Image (cartoon, rainbow, N blue to C red):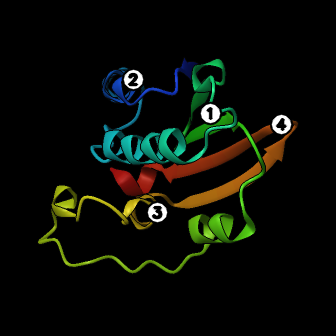
Amino acid sequence: MKIRLSIERDLEQIGPVGECLKQLCNLGDFPELSQVELLVSELLTNVIKHSVPDETNPHAFPVGLTVVADGDNLTLSVSEIGKPMDGEVVRNYTDTKIEMPATDGDLYDLPESGWGMQLIKSICDDISYERLDDSNVLHLCFDLKTAA
C-alpha cells in the first residue's frame, strides 16, 4: 500500500493527517502504531514552523507525506521544497544517540518544546535524509515485526 498526501503549511492540517494515518494503520495488514500520530505531528510541526522557503507565500509550498506499507515495514517520507537542510540538523535527526527525559512511559508528558528530534529517533527503527531536486526528504522507517 502506498499513499501520498499534500499538506498546506498550516498547523491546522496536522490533526486531520494524524487521524488519516491512524485509519491507514487500522486498514492495513499491520498492527496499529500508536505513536505514529504523535511522531508525524512532531515532524510536520517542525517542518511547518522552521522551513519556510518563501515567507511571503508559504502556502505555495505544500509539505508532502508518503506512507508505504510493504510487508513487515512501514515507511513515512516527509518532503518539502526549500533550502537544503543544514548538515548539523541532518546529523541531529539521523544520529543514533538518543537522550530522552524520564516520562513514566508516557510520551505525551514530554516538555512542550525541544524534544521533537529525540522523540522521532526514539520511535523509528531507521531515519535517513536525501535531497531530491529542490526538496528535502526525510524517511522514517519502522520494522512492524518489532512493533507488534
Q: What x and y, as percent, mark residue 40? A: 42, 41
Q: Between marks 1 and 3, how big is the CA–CA gap?
A: 24 Å
Horizontal side of residue 73 vs 10, given as left or right: right
Q: Residue furthest front?
A: 56
Pair 1/2: label in front: 1
- Residue 75 in percent (x, y) is at 57, 41
**Marks 1 and 2, how far apart in space?**
18 Å
Q: Residue at x 54, y 43 (%)?
A: 47
Q: Quadrant of residue 115?
A: bottom left
Give the mark nearest the N terminus, 1 or 3: 1
**Residue at 59% from the left image edge and 29% from the top image edge:** 63
Image side of residue 111 versus residue 25, left or right? left
Mark 2: secondary structure: helix
- Residue indicated by mark 2: 13
Split into 4 quadrants, where in the image is the N terminus? Answer: top right
Crowd rating for badge 3 (residues with CA inside 10 Å; few <14, some 14–19, many 20+)? some
Mark 2 is surrounded, within 10 Å at the Cα level, by few (under 14), some (14 to 19) or many (20 or more) other residues, namely: some
Looking at the image, tell me whether mark 2 or mark 4 is earlier in sequence order.
2
The residue beneath circle 3 is 117
